[in-house]
Structure formats: C-alpha cells, structure tokens
Image: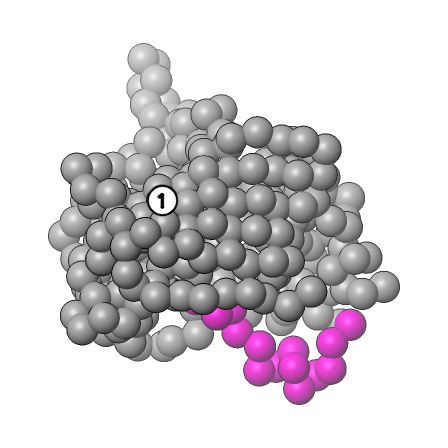
C-alpha cells in the first residue's frame, strides 16, 4: 500500500494519497478509542505518562511569526480560557494543541524500534531548527463544534513556484491538520485518502487559516472537510476532503 501522490502548486489539481501514515503523535495507546474519549484527548494533547520529559513545544510563538499569525494565534488562544461573572476563569471552547518534534523518544511505542532510528527520528513538519524557515503552525481544537483550525506560515525552504509555497508542503499541512482532527474524533487513525484542489497560490512568509470540520463517520471511516483561506477568509487557497481509518496500536506497530 504505497503512496500515489502527484503534487504541484497549480490550481484545480487533485492529489490522492492511499494508506499513508497520518500524524503519529496521538497514536499512543490502543485503549484510547471512541469519539472524544477523555483519556485519549488528554494523552494526545498534553503528553502525560508515558512521556518521560517535557520537550520543546513548537506551537508557542517565536520571533519569526508575522503580525497576522500572531493576531490569529491570540484570537483563538484567548478563547482557551474565559472569565466568568464571578471573576474566575474556566475552560473556553477552544484548546491549543502542543506540538513536538520527537514523538518516538517520548512514547513507549519507540521501544519497538532500533536505538538508531529512535535517536534520529524527527516529526517531518518539525525537523528544521531555524525558526521561520519552513513549517510554522499552531493548531486549536473545538471539541463541542468538532472543528479544528491551524494557523500556518510557510517559510522560504518550502518554495515551489517562485515566491510561493510548494503544493506538497500545503498537502503536508492539510494531512497534519485533518489527521490530528480525525484522531481526536475517532482515536488512532491512518490516512486512507486525500483529495486536494488548489485554487490560488500561497506566498512564502504569508499566513493562512486552515479549517477542518467533520463531514460524517461510517464505522471505522472518518470523513473530513478542509479549506485553506486568507486570514480574513476572503480568499480560498485550497479545498480538500480526507478519509481516515481507525486502527489499533497493534496494527501501527506491525504486531
């Protein structure tokens, strides 16, 4: 089951990917299953046991973030906690999802891999040390609305068409967002199919808003809709649909 991906940064191009591996971060323990299972959401989002230490959280602002990215970050982050009439704070509708670059180092599943692979493995979207050079993004989840948004800024190392983000980098971020969203909806998942239509190019260094919403579920299948727009929503850059299949950790680790 290999990938059948053809990517480019041109409008109206469809990209399909069959049985590729979606984001691995939430795939920690096969007991985390079912729609919005509390234990699963807590494990995927905040990394308690079995994680042994606190790595760098790449979802926090850094000096490379532009004004539009910071504005969107503050818009959603301010809704993670809200003030009550009594003057106290409580959880808001949105939740920021931490993001790390070394999943295998901190997850117990890493013991099934060789020490060499384990020590060198890095999450694809978090393997560039220079801030602002590649994938800068932060993801927020709204559990009640079953929506997930991602604020994304593409750096100069992601160039495709001159001065614009490569279509493959856009597809990577769509897979990252929708795969993360699907894992919160349905537990551990793998990407079965992505269909992507490119409407307008994304300039390097600019900020876009990516939104993932639930279309429907059918047994093990979770269907999602995704769109990528300008920060104010006035321009559509990309539209996509995704299909994700629920799996067990035994399946993921080849046991």
196 to the left or right of 10: right
117 to the left or right of 255: left
How far across and down, in percent of the image, does residue 196 sit?
41, 51
241 to the left or right of 237: right
Residue drawn where x is 26% and y is 49% of the image: 199
**Residue at the extreme right of the image, as rendered:** 255
Name the residue beneath numbered marker 1. 239
**Residue 121 seen anywhere in this rendered image of the structure:** yes
Specify whether residue 114 is painted magenta: yes
How far across and down, in percent of the image, does residue 75 sit?
25, 37
**Residue 131 seen anywhere in this rendered image of the structure:** no
The stretch in magenta equals 112-125
Residue drawn where x is 71% and y is 70% of the image: 110
- In this view, the residue in front, 41 or 210, is 210
- In this view, the residue in front, 18 or 116, is 18
Image color mode: one colour
The quadrant of the picture occupied by the C terminus is: bottom right
Residue drawn where x is 65% and y is 82% of the image: 117
């Amino acid at each position: 089951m290999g990938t059948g991906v053809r990517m480019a940064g041109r409008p109206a191009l469809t990209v399909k990917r069959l049985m590729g591996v979606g984001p691995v971060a939430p795939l920690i323990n096969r007991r985390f299953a079912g729609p919005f299972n509390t234990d699963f959401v807590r494990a995927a989002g905040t990394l308690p046991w079995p994680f042994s230490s606190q790595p760098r959280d790449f979802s926090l602002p850094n000096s490379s973030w532009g004004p539009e990215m910071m504005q969107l970050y503050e818009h959603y982050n301010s809704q993670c906690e809200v003030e009550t009439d009594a003057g106290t704070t409580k959880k808001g509708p949105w939740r920021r999802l931490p993001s790390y670059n070394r999943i295998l180092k901190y997850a117990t599943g890493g013991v099934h891999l060789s020490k060499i692979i384990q020590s060198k493995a890095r999450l694809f979207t978090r393997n560039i040390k220079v801030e602002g050079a590649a994938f800068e993004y932060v993801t927020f989840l709204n559990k009640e609305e079953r929506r997930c948004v991602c604020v994304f800024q593409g750096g100069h190392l992601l160039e495709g068409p001159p001065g614009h983000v490569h279509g493959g980098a856009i597809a990577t971020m769509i897979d990252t967002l929708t795969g993360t969203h699907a894992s919160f909806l349905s537990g551990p998942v793998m990407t079965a199919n992505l269909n992507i239509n490119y409407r307008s190019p994304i300039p390097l260094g600019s900020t876009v808003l990516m939104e993932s919403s639930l279309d429907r579920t059918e047994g093990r299948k979770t269907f999602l809709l995704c769109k990528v727009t300008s920060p104010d929503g006035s321009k559509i850059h990309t539209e996509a649909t995704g299909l994700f299949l629920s799996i067990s950790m035994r399946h993921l680790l080849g046991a």
